[in-house]
Amino acid sequence: MTALVQHEIGPFTIDDWHALPARADGSRLELLEGYWLVTPPPSGPHQWAEKQLVNLLDRAIASTPNALYAVGGIGVESGTERRTALIPDFVVLDTAPLGNSFGAEHVRLAGEIWSPGNTAREQRDKLDACAEAGIPFFWSVAQDGRGPTELVAYRLDEGRYAPATSVRLGDGPVHLEESPAPLELDIATLRL
């Protein structure tokens, strides 16, 4: 479960977000339209799936002519006017991941692994924030207590995400084009 924290002095800025110390408990603090969004530490199945997705993306982008980097849990700044800085579960960057946050213009793909406690509004707000930031691809991953059950791959189309490919548990390997490099994905390989 996540919580949107509205402080009486907000809205906050990306500079405020950068000024915060690291969270000792492993939770993530994001900034959505100037207000804090606190997410508890990811579960073991969540972290396993994230690792597998980053590895899968890493193998796929290795054959691309441009240098791309698949990483997990890194900050993405959507611009100071939006006052939004998110920490997607995994991203593909077109710049070396030197630092702990990057402008959205360097993100080719962002992905979120949703826990059952994530609200539909939070999912929509993050999807919309990534679309407004111009990130070409977004992956939305639903999970249960053992890991992912479905992945929906979106492609940016005229400033909004359009769902293009859905992969469900039991489908077997499915070809995905909604990525900086095409790849095959089987949800079963992401589960414990």
Image (cartoon, rainbow, N blue to C red):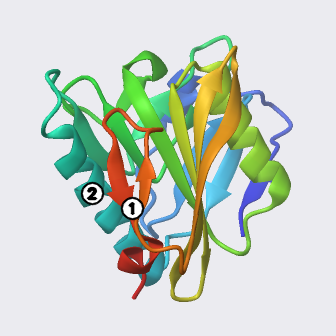
Mark 1 near mark 2, Cβ–Cβ under 8 Å? yes
Q: Residue at x 51, y 33 (%)?
A: 137
Vertical side of 100 occupied by 80: above or below:
above
Front position in the image: 120 or 149: 149
Question: Is the residue marked by circle 1 packed among few (<14), some (14-19), or many (20+) residues within 10 Å?
Answer: some
Q: Residue 84, can we see it?
A: no
Dot 2 amino acid type: Leu
Label drawn at residue 56: 2
Residue 76 place in picture, x, y as percent: 47, 32
Query: At which x and y percent is residue 159?
Result: 69, 17
User: Mark 1 or mark 2: which comes first in sequence?
Assistant: 2
Label 1 belongs to which residue? 185
Amino acid beneath label 1? Leu
Q: Residues within 10 Å of mark 2 (few under 14, many from 20)?
A: some
Q: Left or right: 187 with respect to 164? A: left
Return the x and y of residue 180 as percentages of the image width and height: 35, 32
Q: Quadrant of the C terminus?
A: bottom left
Give the residue displayed 58% in from the left and 32% down from the top: 155
Rendered residue at 69%/14% (across/down): 158
